[in-house]
Image (tube, rainbow, N blue to C red):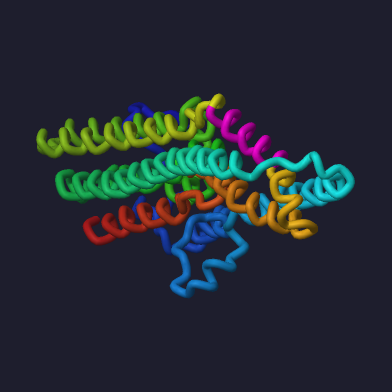
Amino acid sequence: MQHDSPFELPMAGLPKGGLADPQSAHYQAASLSSSVDSPLTNHPESKTFLTTALAWQGTVTPKVMPRVTVVAAYAALVQVAVTYFPELTLPVTPFEYSGAVLTLILVLRVNAGHDRWWEARKLWGNIVNQSRNLAVVVCAYSKSQDPQVATALNWIAAWPHVMRESLRKENQLKEVAAIIGPQEAQSVRQAENMCLYVALKIATLLEGFRNQGMDPFAFHRAETERSQLVDAFGACERIRNTRMPFVLAVKSRRFLLLFLLLLPFAFADRTGWMTPIVVALASYPLFSLDEIGAELQNPFSPRNLSHLPLTDLCKSIAKSVLSLGRTTL
C-alpha cells in the first residue's frame, strides 16, 4: 500500500481506534515470550543474610567454581611435590604484599564495571522520563480528535522496545508488532538502524502536528525530548561497544594466574594437606571479583549476570504511554 505522505502511517494490526492496548492478549503473549532473561536479571537482595550469602542462581559462583576446582587440584599436586622436594617451598611474605596489590587491581576492575552498569541504569531512567514527557506533550498540545495522535503514542510506546532489541542485537520485535502492527514492525526490522528509523517516524509525526497548529513551544519541547531519547540511546551504544581496555584485562588476569600458580608453594610447608582447601578459599574471592568485573561490562546483554531489567522497563514505559492515550483520546 502506497502512502501519499510520510505523515500517513499504516495502522494495520492495531485495535479499533488506533491506540494499542497493553492489556490485550496479543501484547501480553508477546511480552511473555520475550521475558526469558529473568533468571540473570538484576533483582533486589534478600533481607535475610543467609539467603543472600548462600544464593546460587544469578551469582558468579557457578562460573568460577570450575576454576577454583582446578586450582585446588593443582595445589594438591604441588603438595605432593613439596613432600618429596621440601626445597621447593617459598616464603609467604611476598604474597602478603602482592596479594594486596592484586586485590586492589581487581577492585578497580569491578569499580570500572559498576560505573558502566550504573551509567546505563541512569540512561534508562532518562529514557523512561523522556518517553513519558514526550507522550504528555503529544496528548496535551495536539488535537485529541486527530487519529495521528494515537499513532504517535503507539510509536513512542514501541520505541523503548526497539532500543532494547537494538542494544541486544536482536530484531524479533514481538512487542513492537503488537503495538504498531506487523507491517510497520517489519519496516523497522529492515532498517539499517532501527532506533533512528523510529526517531524519524516520530519526528515526521511531530512535524505534522506543527503544521496542524501545535503550539511552537510545545513542538520545540517535544523535539527536545525526542532528540534526548536519541542521545540516551547513543550513550547506551557507547557503553555496549566500548569494552574494558584489553591491556588492563590481560595484566590483571596474568597477575592473578601467576599469583595462584605460586601461592601453593608458600602454604605447602605450613598447612600440609590442607593446602588445596586453603588455596581454593583464597582463589574463590579473587576469581569472583575478576568475573564480576567482566560481567558488568555489558549491562544490556541477557547473557550477563545482573543485567538491567530492560524488558520490565520497556513494559512500564509502554503501559504508561498507552494508558495516557486511553484517558485523553
Give the side of residue 94 with respect to residue 150, left or right: right
**Residue at image coords 32%, 48%:** 125
Q: How many marks?
A: 0
Give how far across and how far down residue 230 sits, in percent. Answer: 33, 33
Residue 253 painted magenta: yes
Q: Quadrant of residue 93?
A: top right
Residue found at the very far right of the displayed protein: 84
Q: Looking at the image, which is closer to me, 133 or 45?
A: 45
Q: Looking at the image, which is closer to me, 221 or 186?
A: 221
The reply to whether residue 12 is in sight is no
Residue 289 vs 247, above or below: the answer is below
**Residue at image coords 86%, 49%:** 83
Residue 45 vs 170, above or below: the answer is below
Q: Main secondary structure of the magenta part?
A: helix
Give how far across and how far down residue 214 sits, in percent. Answer: 14, 38
Magenta part of the chain: 248-262
**Residue at image coords 15%, 45%:** 141
Residue 261 painted magenta: yes
Residue found at the very far front of the displayed protein: 87
Give how far across and how far down residue 26 sits, in percent. Answer: 51, 58
Q: Looking at the image, which is closer to me, 48 or 277?
A: 277
Give how far across and how far down residue 235 sits, in percent. Answer: 37, 33
Give the side of residue 139 with respect to residue 262, left or right: left
